[in-house]
Image (spheres, helix red, strand yellow):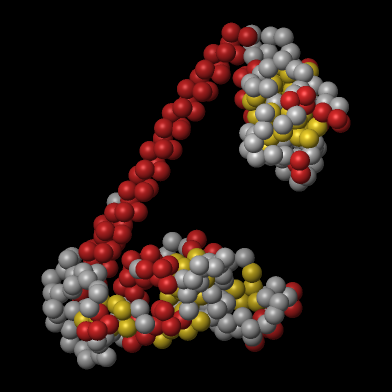
């Protein structure tokens, strides 16, 4: 066992050898290493700022806890970095991984000077040959992890394509036996549907507003973060992020309105289908609790001839289309009219159940 500070020699950096972040260039003759997470923070054209130390070195971000392995000439950023030169019989890559290990064990101390805690830690240091074997095994495992991550990314992309294909076919009537609709509703006109996909002749297109009640949430008081809204909180208050995070039912929340908050809002009943129309567009989930939400979320309550799960899956199938309606602003959003006029392929309740069952069975993949 050895104290970490006994394994390294700190490179002394005089103030005139440091480059302030405001003087970083996008390109230059010498890379500047700062304490941020990026390997290279910026560049300078002043090659005289190159640190006079043998390579490689370990860069420790004293405020950020970033650890970097540097094996090329560099200059130092102005704040918060420690340049650590491994002592004799300490393999640089071993020290690099060991430093990362010690950092992972640090408690979160905010913007603290973290190095003073690391340098007091004890560390097992085997002989140099064993250090090299340990590093080789770590990098072998990391390579396998990287390959696994890449495979997962590709699989996730493939599943997203598959998911949209399932939804597309489901709402074109390709998963069910077709039976006539036994209801009379205000169907959409041929002019409104001529550009939409063909559906079975027993099906009809209809505007979403004719399938249930749609209403925006309410949060009238300004500013919206006024502490008065949350005093004595007992009514869950949800936002778009919590709708997006829910898999099916929303039961988790971070804020609660008090009586004053409720007076300027509305309490929606458990089971309401929530549809986001700002920031996260067309994310859907059911309320698993009675809750309030702002006007960036729309609540949908279905009529008796439509199943809410059917509408939820259809909204999901229309995400790209709904995103296209959002203006190119800093925060994407659509209005209530867009949802009310969204044309939905309608079929009998029995067929809706079959569509939902087929979608969910295929999604279990």
Identity of the residue drawn at 43% across and 75% down: 273
Q: Is residue 74 visible?
A: yes
Q: Is residue 237 above or below residue 302?
A: above
Would you say 166 lies left or right of 332 here?
left
Would you say 179 lies left or right of 115 here?
left
Identity of the residue drawn at 83% across and 23% down: 12
Residue closer to the observer: 292 or 86: 86
Q: Is residue 106 visible?
A: no
- The location of residue 331, given as percent across then percent down, is 55, 67
Classify the position of the N terminus by image quarter: top right
Q: Quadrant of residue 59?
A: top right
Q: Quadrant of residue 102?
A: top right
Looking at the rendered structure, the number of numbered marks drawn on it comes to 0
Would you say 155 lies left or right of 266 here?
left
Residue closer to the observer: 28 or 6: 28
Identity of the residue drawn at 72% across and 31% down: 45
Q: Quadrant of residue 163?
A: bottom left
Residue closer to the observer: 113 or 272: 113
- The location of residue 295, given as percent across then percent down, is 55, 78
- Residue at the extreme right of the image, as rendered: 15
Residue closer to the observer: 269 or 64: 64
Q: Is residue 58 above or below residue 271?
A: above
Identity of the residue drawn at 52% across and 17% down: 136
- The location of residue 24, given as percent across then percent down, is 72, 39
């Amino acid at each position: 066992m050895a104290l970490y500070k006994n394994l390294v020699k700190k490179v002394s950096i005089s103030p005139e050898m440091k480059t302030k972040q405001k003087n970083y260039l996008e390109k230059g003759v010498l890379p500047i290493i700062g304490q941020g997470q990026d390997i290279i923070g910026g560049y300078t054209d002043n090659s005289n700022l190159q640190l006079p130390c043998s390579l490689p070195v370990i860069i420790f971000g004293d405020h950020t806890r970033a650890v970097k392995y540097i094996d090329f000439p560099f200059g130092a950023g102005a704040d918060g970095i420690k340049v650590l030169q491994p002592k004799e019989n300490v393999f640089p890559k071993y020290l690099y991984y060991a430093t990362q290990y010690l950092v992972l064990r640090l408690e979160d101390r905010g913007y603290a000077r973290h190095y003073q805690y690391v340098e007091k830690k004890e560390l097992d240091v085997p002989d140099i040959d064993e250090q090299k074997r340990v590093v080789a095994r770590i990098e072998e495992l990391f390579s396998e992890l990287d390959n696994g991550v890449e495979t997962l990314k590709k699989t996730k992309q493939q599943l997203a394509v598959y998911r949209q294909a399932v939804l597309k076919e489901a709402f074109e009537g390709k998963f069910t036996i077709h039976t006539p609709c036994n209801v009379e509703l205000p169907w959409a006109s041929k002019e409104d549907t001529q550009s939409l996909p063909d559906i079975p002749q027993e099906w009809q297109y209809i505007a979403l507003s004719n399938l249930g009640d749609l209403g925006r949430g309410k949060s009238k008081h300004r500013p919206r973060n006024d502490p008065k809204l949350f005093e004595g909180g007992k009514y869950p208050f949800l936002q778009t992020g919590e709708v997006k995070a829910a898999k099916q039912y929303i039961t988790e929340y971070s804020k609660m309105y008090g009586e004053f908050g409720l007076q300027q809002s509305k309490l929606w009943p458990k089971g309401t289908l929530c549809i986001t129309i700002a920031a996260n567009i067309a994310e859907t989930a059911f309320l698993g609790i009675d809750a309030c939400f702002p006007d960036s979320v729309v609540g949908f309550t279905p009529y008796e001839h439509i199943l809410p799960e059917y509408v939820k899956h259809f909204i999901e199938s229309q995400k790209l289309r709904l995103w296209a309606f959002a203006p190119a602003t800093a925060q994407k959003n659509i209005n209530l009219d867009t949802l009310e006029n969204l044309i939905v392929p309608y079929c009998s309740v029995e067929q809706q159940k079959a569509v939902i069952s087929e979608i969910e069975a295929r999604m279990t993949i």
